[in-house]
Image (spheres, rainbow, N blue to C red):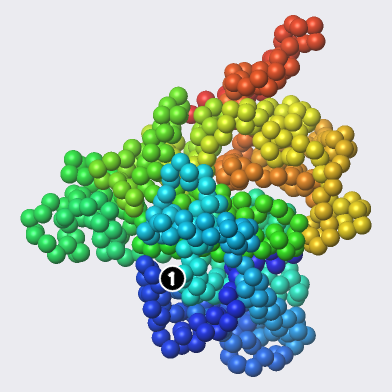
Amino acid sequence: MAARDAMALAHGAVVPGLTRRVAESARRGARAAPRGGRAVIPARAAWPRARKVRAASTSLRPGTTRPARHVPTAIVPTDESGPTADADEAGSDQDTIPAAEWENVSASFDDAERIKDKIAAIAANINIKSSLGADEMELIRQKASMYPTLDDIVLDFSDGMENGAATKLLLIGAYFQSSPAEVAVRLAEVTAVGAGIYATWTWEEKTGVPEERRTRAERLREGIASLGPVFVKMAQTLSTRPDIIGAEAADALKPLQDQMTAFPSNDAYEQIRRCLDRDGPVCPGDPTWTGSSDAEPIYAELSAVPVAAASIGQVYKGKLHTGERVAVKVQRPGVLRRIALDLHISRMALIWLEESGLNGSEGLANIVDRVGQGIFQELDYTREADNADAFRRALRFLDFVVVPRHHASLTGRTVLTQEWIDGEPMKNLGDDDQLKMVQMGVECSSAQLFRTGLVHADPHEGNLLYTDAGKLALLDFGLVCRVNNAQQEAMAGCILNILNRDWMDLIDNLRIIEMLPETPQTWVDANGVPAAYSGEEGLGGQWAVSDDATFRKAFVDCMDGEDPSSKKLTNFTELVVDLTKLSTRWRFNLPPYMVFIIRSLTTLDFCAVRTGANMYELAAPTALFRAMAPKTERGRAQLRKMLLAKDGDVNWQKLIALTESAGAGAGGAEEGA
């Protein structure tokens, strides 16, 4: 099921009949450009990089090899390597598949073909009508027609659309109904990648490839990374949902990062001039400038090639005429249209997965809505600049945090000019500096979660630098989320609950942050018998209400383990593992805002584990600070419960214990600061 779900989520759907017509068109030559887009260039799409397969024959028989497939792709060509890509590395003795194994391998490819045909049939019945009535659909179409361009829909952040990602995606769906060929071409490309992932995944499963020799996790990461930012962020989000895609797929997706080949600097220069509405060279020697040689350049210097590139934009190092060094981020041309299209087909795929009942999950479209809400904001660099300013103000009480300032006159929707910060990513540091960086990172993250409520939602290692002055620099504020006072206090309470092993209060706090339903629910099979929920039982199984006492006992037993005295909780991943075990029988929720928080904590937790730091102890001082200064009535009640004995006197022993546990983290942080 994990492989099937991973594939379904990776490729969406194919419009019936169009895949074949697109392939025929690809053989005839380039297709016309879609409305408002770039020319669509056919290219080969990679089939699975099977280490034991060599393309040498067009026939399929035991002891032979499988031919490479040719599938059209749109706008951005995919990796053109076929099944032979890694064959040479494996050695000549692995060039062919033994006859005894061919039946399983052939079945994997046949399964991939069948799944593509199945998706084609599904796509015939999938559109944005699946969640709307005819009258509502007509209103959506009318509203979409009022926007001059797709850009206007995506970049509408007015009051009615500020948090209306679902509405915006419906408008985008209505927009693309007038471009069915463009949708079909993109779906064909995504399906080709998904089919390759599926074939590799099932092949290694059926042939019993040992775990240490499996390549399917790498293939899954590479395939999704090749599809661009929407699928990368969707996969990062789904890596926190093993209940949907399975534990192995979830683990494989956790280290996934957004990387992409840089686009030509000449295109970037044109983008800068257009966005900033300047009539002159971008920098001295600008090859794209054909006007007067006396015109003043926008920048005194700008690197000829980008110093970093991702799927949404790339960064150049430059210098202003004042001598100040700057980082100039330029958005990739055409990326807005691609992101809108990919979100549209992703939402269709998840709605189908939910309505099909394949794994019993609910609210899957909310995942796309939340990712869309974040990624839409990333497409407007003026909002990113505003977010950075808000973070700098909110975290001014942390003197070790550095947030770059931007230059408003050199910043627009697709260009962002910020001060250049010298520093090193964690992977380049020695052990001592890594520990210092982790301590500062956890304290900074704790302050966001428990004090300011403004959370950097994408703190991967590329967005964190250890500066030459020994401070922590935060970069890239395109993706942020906000949490309210009740959620802040509950999350702070979770840290203290874990340190004190107070599992009853932890349950209450998890309910406040909406990870647990108010009334416990357990999974039962079609006969109403409690069963382990693995995603396979979606057809017939369901969640059934259970009593609170039974759930609390199961929760305590899981958190304590077989030997409570020997179980030490030192990192966030351990908590996730325990909660995942519980989720096989008891219902857990993942509210949209928690998706980004879990991603944030998981990144920091990975760094903390690498340095041997205890994440809970590092977070305890800030958590205790918030617990001691509550802003909600429940927070004040919890404080009284925590500090007052039954006779009304202060429980000094408990206060001292809490202070000591928090002091351990604070002491370590101070030593490392």
Residue 544 x, y percent position in the rendering? 84, 47
Residue at (80%, 6%) from the top-left corner? 647
Position of residue 225 in the picture relative to residue 556 (left or right):
left
Q: Residue at x 71, y 35 (%)?
A: 510
Judge by depth and name the residue closer to the eye, 289 or 445.
289
Task: Specify whether residue 129 is in view.
Answer: yes
x and y, in percent, of residue 496 in the image: 68, 27
Q: Residue at x 38, y 74 (%)?
A: 33
555 on left or right of 652: right
**For mark 1, what is the residue?**
76
Q: Nearer the viewer, residue 329 or 92?
A: 329
Element under disc 1: loop
Q: Quadrant of the N terminus?
A: bottom right
The residue lying furthest to the front in this view is 135
Residue depicted at 52% across the width and 44% down the height: 163
Q: How many marks?
A: 1
Whether residue 343 appears in this view of the structure is: no
Question: Residue 174 vs residue 646: left or right?
Answer: left
Check the image and report above or below for 668 versus 45: above
Question: Mark 1: few, some, or many residues within 10 Å (few <14, many ≥20)?
Answer: some
**480 to 234, vertically: above or below:** above
